[in-house]
Amino acid sequence: MTLPSAIARLPERTTEFGALLVRWAEINSGSGHLAGLNRMRAALRDEFGKIPGAQLEELPCHGTLAALRVSVRPEAKTRFLLSGHFDTVYEANDPFQRCRWLDAERLNGPGVTDMKGGLITTLAALQTFEGTPHAANVGWDALLTPDEETGSRGSAHLFREAPARVQFGLVFEPARPNGDIVHSRKGTGGIVATCRGRAAHAAKIPNDGRNAILALAEFVLAASRIPAEQPGVLLNIGNIRGGGPATNVVPDFARSELDLRITKVADREPLLARLHALADEINRRDGYKLELSGGFNRPPKECLPLEEKVFPEWQRAAHDVGVAPFTWVHTGGASDGNLLTAAGLPNLDGLGPIGDQLHSDREFIIVPTIAQRAQVAALFLHRVAAGEIRLAG
Ligand SMILES: [Zn+2]
């Protein structure tokens, strides 16, 4: 088997990719930093806009926040979505702003793996695919969004629209540190529990105060046991606040935020029902009111039949470009792949480069894996364009 030369030669560009990554990672684009997000989107326009035939659209997300969609051959019968986010968890005031080479291959920097390295993988895969002989048979959208790290609320509609434009999604979130990609992801949500009691002087005898902190503590302790009762569910008591500065007052207010994760769509109702039953136990007591608000923002990404069929082809493409063997695994973190699955679009996720220590100032990427993972994607697209891989179910 011989690789199209554009694909075979991709690793020669590793130095170029490293330099571009340093430039992009040092543009602060924290999810809350609007000016930085605009600068990052402009940088993406510059590079993706050079792909021959690229049509660029800026799509409003929320307020003045905008996504970038790059389309080639919108009329093609077989089309792909390649998706990635250009926001990071490091805000403008974060001390972590600069890149540093740890050794010849590993680069430490904000968002280098999650996921500016993935954006370069996407760019390189598309540039390379466009240089393969059957590219005219396949069209694509690159959808680059500004709010993934905060739950993709503003861009969710762009993922819902995707099945009308494309047949399959490729999500370039990071690979696992051992090279595995993502089989499925937990769905994520959050609940705010607000408890009201009755204030009284701490020394009153008998005391008709109703301590909201104690009641809420009972609730969160009971809630923390749900994962043991319901396999596939994760629940974290993220914070708790209550009372006031005076400790001689029975506190009448307490509030806690819970992080919720589920493995299957079917886990959602039993989890919410159990939480409400626990709240009802508190509410049956005289003088207490415990209210729950919130819910799920990203449903679980469950593995779809077409993904099962296509994954061995992805592994074969990886083998043929010399990437070490890997498999696909379940993960607790959500991504925009969850939204694509909820929209009914089969997709492979975790296709980006390899790194580790995401969301910390120790985040690093193994830079040569940018070109390697781009080779896999380009070869896979080439084989679809050549008719070797069929996407029909
Ligand atoms: Zn990410």
Image: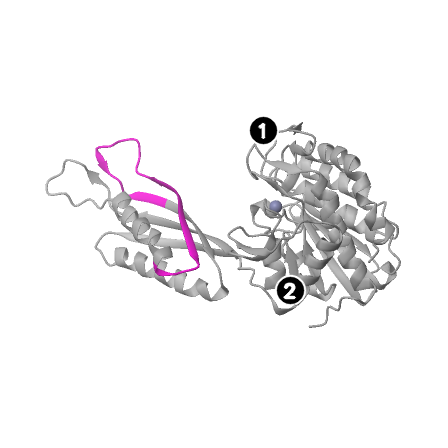
In this picture, which residue range is highlighted in magenta?
229-255
SS for tag 2? helix
Residue 182, horizontal then vertical, whole percent: 59, 55
As drawn, the residue found furthest toward the front would be 1
Q: Earlier in the sequence, mark 1 or mark 2?
A: 1
Q: Which residue is mark 2?
A: 307
Q: Which residue is mark 1?
A: 93
Residue 323 visible somewhere in the drawing: yes
On the picture, is 167 further left or further right than 362? Answer: right
Residue 250, horizontal then vertical, whole percent: 23, 39
Q: Please tell me whether residue 254 belongs to the stretch shown in magenta.
A: yes
Q: Is residue 181 above or below residue 391?
A: above
Residue for point 30% across, 48% down: 216
**Callout 1–callout 2 Cβ contact below 8 Å:** no
As drawn, the residue found furthest toward the left would be 205
Q: Is mark 2 within 8 Å of ligand 1?
A: no
Q: The residue under label 1 is which amino acid type?
A: Asn
Q: CA distance from mark 1 to mark 2?
A: 40 Å
